[in-house]
Image: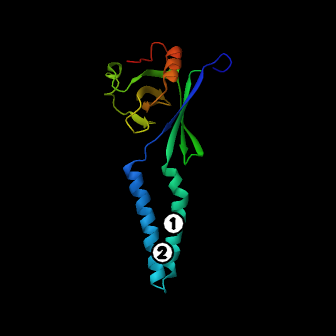
């Protein structure tokens, strides 16, 4: 608790997806093949140059595949930040507890009437490991209906419940 306000943060490491692993492998393979192809065919410096360029791009792009999430609760607002490569932070969404419709565990019956809504934008800020308890928030922001999935700590859930007693469910 900071001053007389509520504050907590939760850090979640996202599992590297199969698609990300495949993309990294394909990029690395392409760079090596182009570079070796350019070296084997001595007259083809362009292939070697392209191979080196792809490998340099891989060096800079590779950390972006390692994504972590940080949720920050401060006085009734939750910030969802993406941390790429362990160092680049970008705020993806800020939501005020007063403006949500409901927050509950992913398979809660409290969400039954919300899960079948049309034109929902799904924001998935989970680890994708299946180990943490996933909560869903249904809210509107800037005229857009959203389903936000995340894995808050128990402290964060308690603080959300304190700020939005009739909107936050734990079962």
Give the residue drawn at x 51%, y 66%. 55
Q: Are marks 1 and 2 in contact (CB under 8 Å)?
A: yes
- What residue does disc 2 label? 35
Residue 46, percent from left and from top = 51, 78
29 relative to 158, above or below: below
Residue 102, percent from left and from top = 42, 21
Q: State the scheme by which the image is colored.
A: rainbow
For the question of whether residue 46 can be seen, the reply is yes
24 relative to 98, above or below: below
- What residue does disc 1 label? 55
Q: Residues within 10 Å of mark 2 (few under 14, many from 20)?
A: many
Residue 109, percent from left and from top = 32, 19
Q: Residues within 10 Å of mark 1 (few under 14, many from 20)?
A: many
Give the residue drawn at x 48%, y 13%. 165
> Cα distance, mark 1 to mark 2?
9 Å
Could you say whether the residue bearing mark 2 is in a helix, strand or loop?
helix
Q: Quadrant of residue 120?
A: top left
Q: Is residue 82 left or right of residue 112?
A: right
Residue 124, percent from left and from top = 43, 37
Residue lying furthest bottom = 43
Ranked by sequence position, the earlier of labels 1 and 2 is 2
> Which quarter of the rendering shows the C terminus?
top left
> Which quarter of the rendering shows the N terminus?
top right
Q: How many marks?
A: 2
Q: Is residue 162 left or right of residue 18?
A: right
29 relative to 110, above or below: below
């Amino acid at each position: 608790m900071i001053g007389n306000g509520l504050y907590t943060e939760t850090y979640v490491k996202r599992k590297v997806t199969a698609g990300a692993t495949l993309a990294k492998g394909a990029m690395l393979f392409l760079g090596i093949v182009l570079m070796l192809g350019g070296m084997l065919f001595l007259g083809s410096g362009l292939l070697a140059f392209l191979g080196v360029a792809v490998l340099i791009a891989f060096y800079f792009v590779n950390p972006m595949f390692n994504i972590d999430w940080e949720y920050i609760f401060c006085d009734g607002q939750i910030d969802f930040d993406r941390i790429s490569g362990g160092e680049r932070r970008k705020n993806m969404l800020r939501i005020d507890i007063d403006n949500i419709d409901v927050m509950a565990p992913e398979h809660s019956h409290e969400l039954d009437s919300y899960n079948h809504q049309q034109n929902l934008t799904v924001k998935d800020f989970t680890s994708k490991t299946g180990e943490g308890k996933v909560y869903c928030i249904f809210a509107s922001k800037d005229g857009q209906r959203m389903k936000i999935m995340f894995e808050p700590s128990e402290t964060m859930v308690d603080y959300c419940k304190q700020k939005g007693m009739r909107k936050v469910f734990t079962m």
